Image (cartoon, grey):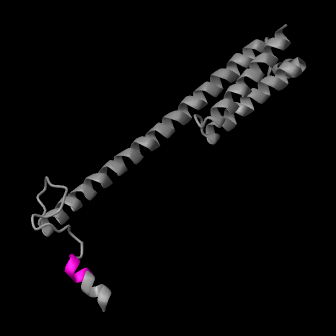
Amino acid sequence: MIVLAGIGLAVLVLVIIVSLLLRRQLREKYATLWIIIGLVILVLALFPGLLLGLSQLLGVEVPANLIFALAIVLLVGVALHLSWELSQAEDEVRRVAEDVAILRADVEELRKSVGLDAGTEGPRANGTVPGEIPDAERRAGDEG
């Protein structure tokens, strides 16, 4: 019965991972780890003697204790990696926010230099848009 439960758990993990990947809710770099975990669970469920031999090799008396120890190490590693990823993302957000602030200041400076009010989005009072060629000049350029 335990073997069937292990196989069922492994298949469930693999199906969930593949489903998340197909719906693009999980990135490939994270899915790789979980697929490996699912495959290890499947192998250990199909061949329970491997776990017993590994636990004897490492000097662990109860194979279940080895599973718990490995799970704890794995979860600590995942938590550490995700903390690192979060720090990287926060740094990137800060850099992007700084770039946006600089660009906004540049846009305001350009608006002031071409005569647009800071709060306006549209054309100038004389009906032209900055950078636009007036109709008379455009037609003269087409004829020549």
**Residue 60 visible in this rendered orientation of the protein:** no
Point 14% across, 68% down: residue: 113
What residue span does the magenta drawing correspond to? 134-138
**Residue 137 seen:** yes
Residue 136 lies in the magenta stretch: yes
Q: Position of residue 43 (x, y in %)?
A: 84, 25
* For residue 8, side relative to residue 17 (left or right): right
In the displayed structure, 8 sits above or below 37; it is above
Q: Is residue 135 left or right of residue 71?
A: left
Q: Nearer the viewer, residue 22 or 42?
A: 22
Residue 141 magenta-drawn? no
Q: Position of residue 97 (x, y in %)?
A: 32, 48
Q: Quadrant of residue 17?
A: top right
Q: Quadrant of residue 50?
A: top right
Q: Is residue 77 left or right of residue 61?
A: left
Residue at horizontal 24 percent and vertical 76 percent from the top:
133
Name the spot of residue 115 as percent of width and height, x first.
11, 66
Q: In which quadrant of the rendered image does the N terminus lie?
A: top right
